[in-house]
Image (cartoon, rainbow, N blue to C red):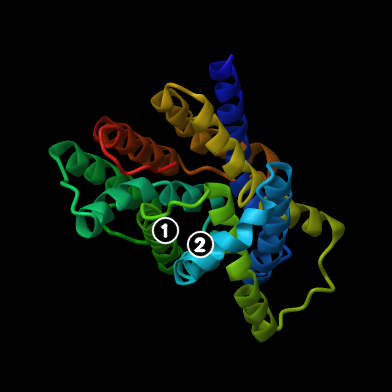
Amino acid sequence: MNERRALGFGLAAVLLWSTVATAFKLTLEQFTPIQMLTIASIVSALALLGVCAWQGKFNQIVPTFKRNPGYFVLLGLINPLAYYLVLFKAYSLLPASQAQAINYSWAITLTLMAAVFLGQTIRKQDWLACLLSYFGVVVIATQGDVIGLQFDSPTGVALALLSTLLWASYWILNTKNRADPVIAVLLGFIVAIPFAIALSLYENAPWQHITLHGWLAVTYVGIFEMGITFVLWLTALKLTQNTARISNLIFASPFISLILLTTIIGETIHPTTLLGLLLIVTGLIVQQLTLRSRNLNVT
């Protein structure tokens, strides 16, 4: 019974994550990246506060922060503040299909950073995974012109790659986190919100043009990209006895995302984007052969 529930939670998380590239693009039609970060973070914090209350963990939030305030401030500044600000900006500059595919290479970045900061050995399979995935990134970014290296938006590509560094850095720091994961994510949003509001005030972008459609889109992002879906994924991993089977579900997400981008917002998917994504996913599958035997717990 637990395995069926784990599969259900895992599939729900993957399907919801598959929608976020489309949701990002729809939201960025009306919000600036800073505005989007601010509102989505507030929505996420409220959603996670509700989850903590429902799970009976509400009274653990303040004591958890007090045990290591500097650590949680650092985590919050990296994710969600810096990570999502950079990611949203990348989505505003690139086709969503390109941005999400490049961002998907973060697990390869994590392998390299784990070697530097955690002293883990990079084996032959890891180097092959890196070669495949980053070649996939080049194929996507240049739309197949790997010799000429001509980028439509060098800044967008650089930001998408920077997002992988930030996300990998967050998980490197998380290896030292002994707090409840839902509370830890919530504290990150609580830390980030004042900074996001300050950036929004400094930007001074108008709000009056935003329609109900825009508010619904940013609320969706806050709940299902940055909040509740994380809880669904953690629940799936907690219930299952076969972590590898649940983890492998995530490989379907970028391909479902491409279908949604095409059908919902009419984005044209360049053939090289699909080729590059296949290279990235192949690299990730090769990487899985080694990551499963390691102690770095990444979801």
Label 2 SS: helix
Closer to the camera, 243 or 211? Answer: 243
Of the 4 image quadrants, the one containing the C terminus is top left
Residue at image coords 29%, 37%:
283
Instruction: Point out the tag, 2 or 1, that comes first from the N-terminus.
Output: 2
Q: Amino acid at mark 2?
A: Asn
The reply to whether callout 2 and callout 1 are in contact (CB within 8 Å) is yes
Rendered position, 224 above or below 87: above
Which residue is outermost to the top? 1
Q: Which residue is mark 1?
A: 170
Q: How far, Cα to Cα, is label 2 from label 1?
A: 7 Å
Figure quadrant of residue 118: bottom left
Closer to the camera, 110 or 206? Answer: 110
Residue at image coords 44%, 67%:
71
Figure quadrant of residue 176: bottom left
Rendered position, 95 above or below 158: above
User: How far across and down, in percent of the image, does residue 30 sit?
Assistant: 74, 64
User: How far across and down, in percent of the image, does residue 192 sit?
Assistant: 59, 69
Figure quadrant of residue 207: bottom right
Of the 4 image quadrants, the one containing the N terminus is top right
User: How far across and down, in percent of the image, does residue 251 sit?
Assistant: 45, 32
Residue at image coords 67%, 55%:
59
- The answer to whether 131 appears left or right of 226 in the picture is left
Q: Amino acid at mark 1?
A: Tyr
- The answer to whether 59 appears left or right of 237 in the picture is right
Q: Which residue is mark 2?
A: 79
Instruction: Count every numbered label the image shows and give the total.
Output: 2
Q: Residues within 10 Å of mark 2 (few under 14, many from 20)?
A: many
- Asked if residue 298 can be seen in this view, the reply is yes
- Asked if residue 152 can be seen in this view, the reply is no
User: How far across and down, in percent of the image, does residue 264 sit?
Assistant: 69, 41
Residue at image coords 70%, 54%:
49
